[in-house]
């Protein structure tokens, strides 16, 4: 399988496809330079295990490290609150997508329109369609998915990578150093 | 007197002396409905054409704006293409991405509406042949005064006999043709006008469905609005394999009826099992509750491959297009019965039944096309009886040893998982199976949608789906449930009893679980949701595959929801209306509330009634596994009535949502018919079409979307109680949008008064009046009501 094959075989992308995150520094740089990012956290993040932790544990570290407001979809807010994160905005994923696509939306913290949507934990086909909506109708927003499955409609996505590689990448991304932008 | 109108010719002769004799009181009508003495004033929009209700549509669409999520970035419908429509690019014809998406949604809705309308035409022709053109339309005897609420509303007609429905279908067919024409290259170009046409297609779909179900209820003697319609067997485990077994698949019931009739005629009813998949089986049980339902579409592969059916009879819609190939592989004789679904088979309609039976029984013919339901019925029964003894000597079941051996061929390439719509961890199951543990494979059965894509993806030709099914053999043997057979319409007296509580908000809502079985986490979630809302005293309606899934759920006492809850249209009822086309009765019930409870005129009065339903009737549709174009059309019909629909995660593949913006206060003003002022009424309902990611999220959305501007304070408090409770259970916190839904202090649920009062005071909340709401400026005194 090539690095730009979608995880679900038939969910091929269009002419404009996601750039593959080949090293964590790319993701760090993208996230680090965003002015008004949001982390859209799907319900699956509470159940997907990476090593001895859940995906949500890595992403909450990311949210706290970069002070990124979290949009909780599905019913993951309960898992966030159990982890002491009490400030998530709870929205269905498609509603979040609609707001992100609105250039006049002030964002969860009133910082202005979202310039980067970080997405993880949604069911693959739902993320695929949501990212498609943002690709076409949110020119002011870049998107990055931190799932370990290639999402062609994102701006940046991991390729289909193993759990081990995923863990290494996520740990590097949430490590407390600042990333460079050179490789992006 | 000779009267010629656009669609009708009427000739009345009071008295005529002619050379051949004297004629008195002769009346001839061609293409005319026998409306009798219907005195109701005719409304403004009988037989609306494509643009007649455009203003209403745009009113809805300005509040619930499309959020497109293209499923394909290209247009490949003409030879200019493929055209890349990414972002703001336009196609060679000038079309934009939003318009292309709306156009595709319209195509889907047209396919759905055409399918139901064509189905209706066939059923009506069949019903007229069986019972005569003058057969009275009778969905419920004296219990039903408004026999056809949708037809009354849309067409402005009051059909009385089957022949009246022909004119109604003429109208549907003309509209679908025009709608389809609008998708041609270089016709419509604006996405909102495409969306308006989507809503038109949905409304036409509802008319077609109503015709179909009225025709079959009237001619075939189905349960007539009976809350206590009999229970029927459901599940593969209910099949008596000691008898010959016939499987019917599809949606169009005449062949199944003919099978049942032939069995009765030959005194064989007790000796042959009639089983079915999809809505044909639902309607077969309405005709005879002795018929058995196997399950939704996702049961097709597993049941055909089980080898249990001795003959397979398919009609139309939702039939796997490889059903014949699968039948051949299972050695099962196959009969196609619809000209819409010939399956490449030789037509044998005019051949003697004896010859067809001999060919199918001997294997000389693997399958035949018989376009005569009675002949197909006879052939099916005779073939099943002829082949059954030999077939029972064969076993198609995979043994545990064979499964282990096959699993050991798995290379763990994961192509099966990547082909699976639900991303099931098949390789893990294969690895365990190769080591002798079938439990993981068996567990996959619970969430498998039965599509078989895993097998086509496998490079080792491993029969993945068959292995999952074989590993779950014990579960399948225990699939023994019951379902309440489809009751059809809702009685007027039921509407009278609940109309007030629904409109005032004191029954918290009407929730309709409908649609196909492309479930992300199995059909069990449908059952769990329906039980949850029934326990909360919502009125739960259901139909088709969703109704089957609800039946496949047992409580601690081993009872299905149909045995736990009444079948009446009342708080806490679970109401199975019937097959897909019976969905018309759910829409019809909301319309009847406007007529029976509020005494609004229905006749050709669509916008006013839709406005009434939207603002006052707390109804929500849930199509958790919606898969088909028909489901798209059904949803579109509900949207035009202003009724929200929630879909599961796969529902995002319908390409667009219709979402409100709760944070835009200016979107939520209504006209108050009492004060003639525009007042803020809150985002109720907040969306018209929204996908939920999880069952828990869906339930929260349903409870929220049941709120309406017209709710009384008592009703709103009750609806808020359910919304807040479900939200807290799912999210571990109170919802942030409570202030948007509290209009006065009396709206606050008593049990949460302290907490909510604190939230309100912190948010700067102010009381707002409870309006007599309408979105139609024309319905406000002094603003041009016509």
Image: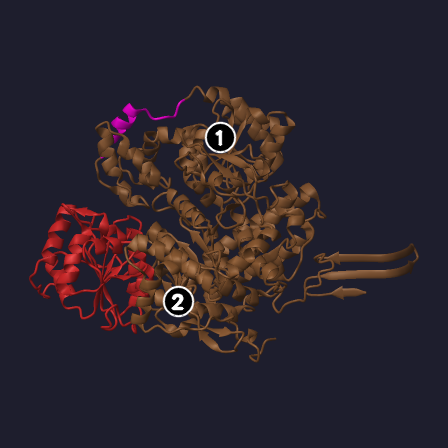
Chain colours: A red, B brown
Measured from the top left, where is residue B273 in percent x and y?
A: 53, 28
Q: Is residue B190 visible?
A: no
Q: Which residue is mark 2?
A: B742
Label 1, secondary structure: give it. Answer: loop
Direction from residue B566 to residue B744 in the image, left or right? left
Element type at mark 2? loop
**In terms of sequence position, does the residue under pointer 1 or pointer 2 come before the other?**
1
The answer to whether residue B93 is above or below residue B498 is below
The quadrant the C terminus of chain A occupies is bottom left
Q: Which residues are magenta?
A: B395-410
- The residue pinned by badge 1 equals B366
Q: Chain of mark 1?
A: B
The image quadrant that residue B24 belongs to is bottom right
Q: Measured along the vertical axis of the image, is residue B731 above or below residue B290?
A: below
Q: Nearer the viewer, residue B412 or B33?
A: B33
Badge 2: few (under 14), some or many (20 or more) residues near its Cα, within 10 Å?
many
In the image, what residue occupies the spot 17% across and 68% down? A34
Are callouts 1 and 2 both on one chain? yes
The residue at the far bottom in this view is B782
| In-image side of B725 versus B575 (left or right) | left
The residue positioned 34% from the left and 29% from the top of the image is B470
Give the camera-side residue of B150 and B529: B529
* Whole-percent x, y for residue A126 in the image: 31, 54
Where is residue A67? Give x, y as percent: 16, 65
> Is residue B368 something one can see in this rendering?
yes
């Amino acid at each position: 399988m090539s690095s730009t094959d979608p995880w679900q075989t038939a969910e091929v992308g269009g002419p404009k496809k996601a750039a593959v995150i080949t090293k964590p520094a790319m993701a760090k740089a993208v996230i680090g330079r965003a002015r008004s990012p949001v982390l859209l956290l799907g319900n699956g993040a509470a159940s997907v295990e990476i090593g001895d932790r859940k995906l949500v544990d890595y992403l909450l570290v990311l949210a706290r490290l970069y002070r990124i407001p979290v949009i909780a979809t599905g019913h993951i807010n309960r898992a966030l609150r159990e982890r002491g994160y009490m400030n998530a905005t709870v929205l269905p994923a498609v509603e979040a997508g609609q707001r992100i696509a609105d250039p006049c939306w002030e964002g969860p913290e009133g910082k202005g329109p979202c310039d980067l949507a970080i997405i993880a934990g949604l069911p693959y086909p739902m993320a695929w369609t949501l990212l498609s909506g943002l690709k076409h109708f949110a020119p002011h927003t870049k998107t990055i998915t931190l799932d370990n499955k290639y999402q062609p409609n994102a701006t940046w996505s991991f390729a289909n990578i193993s759990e081990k590689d995923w863990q290494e990448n996520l740990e590097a991304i949430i490590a407390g150093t600042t990333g460079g932008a050179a490789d992006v | 007197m000779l009267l010629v109108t656009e669609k009708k010719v009427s000739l009345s002769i009071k008295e005529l002396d002619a050379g051949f004799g004297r004629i008195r009181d002769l009346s001839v009508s061609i293409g005319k409905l026998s409306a009798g003495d219907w005195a109701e004033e005719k409304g403004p929009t009988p037989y609306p054409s494509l643009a007649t209700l455009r203003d209403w549509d745009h009113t809805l669409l300005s509040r619930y704006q499309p959020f497109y999520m293209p499923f394909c970035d290209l247009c490949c419908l003409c030879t200019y293409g493929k055209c890349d429509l990414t972002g703001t690019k336009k196609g060679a014809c000038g079309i934009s991405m939003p318009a292309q998406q709306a156009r595709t949604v319209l195509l889907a809705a047209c396919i759905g509406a055409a399918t139901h309308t064509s189905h209706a035409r066939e059923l009506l022709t069949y019903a007229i042949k069986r019972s005569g053109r003058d057969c009275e339309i009778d969905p419920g005897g004296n219990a039903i005064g408004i026999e056809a609420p949708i037809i009354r509303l849309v067409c402005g007609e009051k059909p009385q006999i089957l022949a009246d429905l022909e004119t109604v279908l003429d109208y549907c067919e003309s509209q679908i043709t025009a709608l389809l024409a609008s998708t041609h290259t270089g016709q419509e170009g604006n996405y909102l006008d495409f969306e308006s046409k989507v809503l038109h297609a949905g409304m036409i779909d509802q008319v077609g469905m109503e015709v179909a179900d009225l025709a079959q209820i009237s001619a075939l003697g189905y349960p007539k609005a009976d809350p206590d319609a009999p229970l029927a067997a459901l599940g593969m485990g209910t099949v008596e394999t000691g008898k010959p077994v016939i499987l019917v698949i599809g949606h169009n019931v005449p062949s199944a009826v003919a099978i049942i009739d032939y069995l009765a005629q030959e005194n064989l009813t007790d000796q042959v099992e009639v089983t079915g998949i999809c809505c044909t089986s639902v309607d077969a049980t309405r005709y005879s509750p002795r018929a058995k339902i196997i399950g939704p579409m996702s049961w097709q592969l597993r049941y055909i491959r089980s080898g249990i059916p001795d003959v397979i009879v398919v009609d139309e819609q939702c039939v796997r297009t490889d059903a014949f190939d699968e039948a051949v592989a299972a050695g099962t004789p196959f009969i196609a019965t619809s000209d819409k679904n010939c399956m490449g088979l030789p037509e044998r309609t005019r051949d003697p039944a004896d010859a067809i039976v001999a060919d199918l029984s001997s294997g000389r013919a693997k399958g035949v096309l018989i376009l005569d339901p009675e002949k197909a019925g006879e052939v099916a029964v005779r073939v099943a009886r002829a082949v059954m003894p030999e077939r029972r000597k064969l076993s198609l079941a995979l043994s545990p040893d064979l499964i282990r051996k096959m699993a050991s061929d798995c290379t763990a390439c994961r192509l099966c998982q990547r082909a699976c719509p639900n991303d099931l961890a098949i390789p893990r199951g294969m690895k365990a199976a190769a080591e002798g543990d079938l439990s993981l494979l068996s567990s996959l059965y619970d969430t498998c949608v039965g599509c078989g894509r895993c097998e086509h993806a496998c490079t080792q030709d491993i029969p993945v789906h068959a292995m999952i099914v074989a590993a779950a053999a014990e579960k399948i043997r225990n699939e023994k449930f019951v379902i309440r057979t489809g009751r059809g319409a809702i009685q007027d007296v039921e509407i009278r009893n609940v109309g007030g509580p629904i409109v005032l908000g004191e029954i918290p809502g009407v929730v309709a679980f409908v649609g196909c079985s492309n479930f992300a986490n199995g059909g069990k979630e449908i059952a769990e949701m329906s039980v949850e809302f029934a326990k909360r005293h919502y009125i739960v309606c259901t139909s088709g595959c969703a109704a089957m899934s609800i039946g496949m759920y047992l409580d601690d006492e081993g009872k299905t929801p149909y045995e736990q809850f009444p079948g009446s249209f009342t708080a806490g009822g679970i109401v199975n209306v019937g097959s897909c086309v019976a969905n018309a009765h759910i829409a019809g019930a909301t319309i009847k509330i406007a007529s029976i409870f509020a005494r609004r005129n229905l006749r050709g009065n669509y916008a006013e009634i839709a406005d009434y339903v939207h603002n006052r009737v707390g109804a929500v549709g849930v199509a958790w596994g919606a898969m088909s174009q028909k489901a798209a059309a059904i949803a579109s019909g509900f949207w035009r009535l202003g009724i929200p629909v929630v879909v599961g995660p796969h529902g995002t593949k319908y390409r667009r949502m219709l979402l409100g913006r709760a944070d835009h206060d200016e979107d939520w003003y209504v006209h108050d018919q009492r004060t003639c002022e525009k007042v803020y009424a809150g985002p109720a309902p907040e969306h018209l079409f929204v996908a939920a990611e999880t069952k828990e999220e869906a339930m929260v959305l349903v409870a929220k979307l049941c709120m309406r501007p017209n709710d009384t304070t008592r009703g709103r408090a009750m609806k808020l109680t359910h919304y807040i409770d479900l939200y807290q259970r799912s999210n571990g916190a109170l919802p942030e949008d409570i202030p948007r839904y509290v209009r006065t202090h009396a709206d606050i649920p008593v049990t949460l008064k302290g907490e909510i009062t604190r939230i309100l005071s912190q948010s700067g909340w102010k009381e707002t009046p409870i309006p007599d709401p309408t979105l139609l400026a024309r319905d406000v005194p002094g603003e041009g009501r016509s």
